Amino acid sequence: AKDGYELWLDYRPIENSIMRSEADRLFSGIFFFGKNPTYEAIQKELQLAAPKMTGKAPIFSTERLNQTQVWLGTREELAQVFGLQDQVTIRNLGEDGYWMGPVVFQGKTYFTIVGNRPVGVLYGFFDWLKSLQSGSFDSNKVKMESPKIQLRILNHWDNLDRTVERGYAGFSIWDWHRLPGYIDPRYIDYARANASIGINAVSLTNVNANARILTTDFMKKAKVLADIFRPYGIKVFLTARFSAPIEIGGLKTADPLDPEVIAFWKKKTDEMYQHIPDFGGYLVKANSEGQPGPHEYQRTHAEGANMLADALAPHGGVVIWRAFVYSHEIDEDRHKQANLEFVPLDGKFRENVIIQVKNGAIDFQPREPFHPLFGAVKQTNLGVEFQITQEYLGQATQLVYLSPMWEEVLRSKTFRPTPNSTVAGIVDGSDSGQKLTLMAGVSNIGTDRNWTGHLFGQANWYAFGRLAWDPYLNSEQIAEEWTKLTFGQNPENLTKIKGIMLDSHEAAVTYMTPLGLHHIMGWDHHYGPGPWVTGGRADWTALYYHRADSLGIGFDRTFTGSKALEQYAPEIIQAWSDSEQIPEKYLLWFHHLPWDYTMKSGKTLWEEIGLHYDQGVKSARKMKSTWESLNGAIDPEQFSHVSQLLGIQVQEAEWWRNACLLYFQSISKRPFPSEIEQPE
Ligand code: GCU
């Protein structure tokens, strides 16, 4: 039985006989053109994979001809065997790219994987294994790949006491207490998993940061992790608490223009690079939700970020500065605050600063329109932040495949800087022209045996890596890859599992927050429905967001309301300010409308709300019944794990529907549509 620990690297016997004999042949003569820790990692991976895939141990050749079948090396190492033209082609694949295909040398063909750096070879190697495993390998075909985004980073919201903010899969996998002396084998498996999907950076600590991570003791611990990750091409970042100069530096201020503060950060950073020579840089949450920042000293985000950037620049490090800022002291729609603070600073950030922007302007809701900062600045590097952990999406209890949601955001047209620009085009630099590019994912990883709590949480980790590599991939293809690696090749199983995955996000939106409703979850924990939530700060309550009253429901963000819509391109303002033109999925995000408003279907808004919640429940039930039909066809432990969780998911879908409809009915005072299951 499978407990999920192996993730998508759970190599299994190759089913396809042609593939199987290809693998047999190729694994019998592997030659590396050089020697380094990354090639050793490849060897170890093959020693693990080959026996499981073919029943035989791999054979590593000591010389490059005769018994050899496969060549691995960098472009420089393989210079003699490639013509000039090929060398240029490969060089253009960049730092992390790879070329693989047949190379004929003295009449014999060698299947060859080449990168510009060893890590490119590693990425190619994983791709090759995957293609053998899933039956798509063709030894005569040339394949070239290079990532479209430079920094493909996981953000762990892990605290130093091993609790994980918004983590639902156990404790933090970073065992700070036993570091630096003890190396948990999980660290290596973590690195393998990330490298296999192209993730090349990790921020180890919570954005609500603890300054202690920057003390020498903790640097020594982080160094051990960085050393383990290095052969896998993964760089370490840490979160920098803006008030660290006061908390661990003994200073009276953290003013970014104060010479002593500047000296503190320079010294800290120099020390960091002594421990971790390829340290990635700092990730910073400042002046948001009570975190310290430059505003305390009447300085801007740019002044704060640049001060850190200057300390990192001599070492090639980067500042990732988050745009998730809002303050309850400002009486302004929270939707607008990031643009209000960052647009005036356009052009003021150093080159080694990148602003990390959540996919939407509120906070990782089940569905959000894209963040208006994308397209609103011209001279500022912007990266996108997705949340892999399902804070607002049923946490580790529900099966929600997030790739379709991310795809929707990435493909959204921003109409700026060019008429055809999309979020993906801004983030990968093709539309924005920015050189530094980033996609971040808030990790869903913890100490649970299966890493992510819900088995299908693994698919979200996987999909994040794949989209960070290529933001134009489609969710169906990614689901198919992951499903084959996790459940095997059976086409019937594949169709069913893929179907469940691809329906799951829309289902969750429909039973949680249909038609543009948002932030109506339970207070603070964000689990389950809570549209009645009041009290505390206004922008943490459900009422602030749904604004239901006797007349209608929805948040007016048009020109008659908060005017948040104003922050988008004119094309969007024009279409979305009209309640008839805006896609209905965003309707109540931007409009407050009467309960009896006529929808595209001809039904009233009130009726459509009822029909949506009801449809959401039906979709959840369908996911469950499709899954039940896999009983006996897949591993029993995996089957039962997901089956039980889907049971809870159906109950929770009903809970959402009943709670929301009964609550809204107490305000709308209208009967439910007769065709739905009546909530009680
Ligand atoms: C959400 C989340 C917080 C987190 C914050 C952030 O508000 O609930 O736990 O700290 O996002 O992204 O900074």
Image: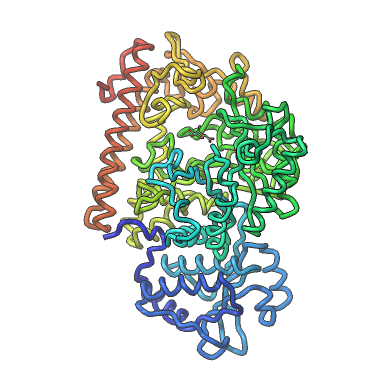
Q: Which corner quadrant of the image does residue 637 belong to? A: bottom left
- Residue 554 visible in the snapshot: no
Image spot of residue 94 (x, y percent): 67, 62
- What colour scheme has been applied to the protein in the rendered image? rainbow
Residue 321 visible somewhere in the drawing: yes
Q: Residue at 35% x, 27% y: name it.
A: 613
Quadrant that contains the N terminus: bottom left
Quadrant including the C terminus? top left
Q: Is residue 469 above or below residue 118?
A: above
Q: Quadrant of residue 104?
A: bottom right
Residue 508 placed where, x, y %? 39, 35
Where residue 100 sits, quadrant-wise, is: bottom right
Q: Is residue 273 above or below residue 666?
A: below
The front one of 203 and 639 is 203
| Relative horizontal placement of residue 44, taking residue 433 as reference (left or right) | left
**In the orientation shown, which residue stands out farthest toward the front?**
250
Near-viewer residue (193 or 235): 235
Using the image as rendered, state which of residue 600 and residue 249 is in the foreground: 249
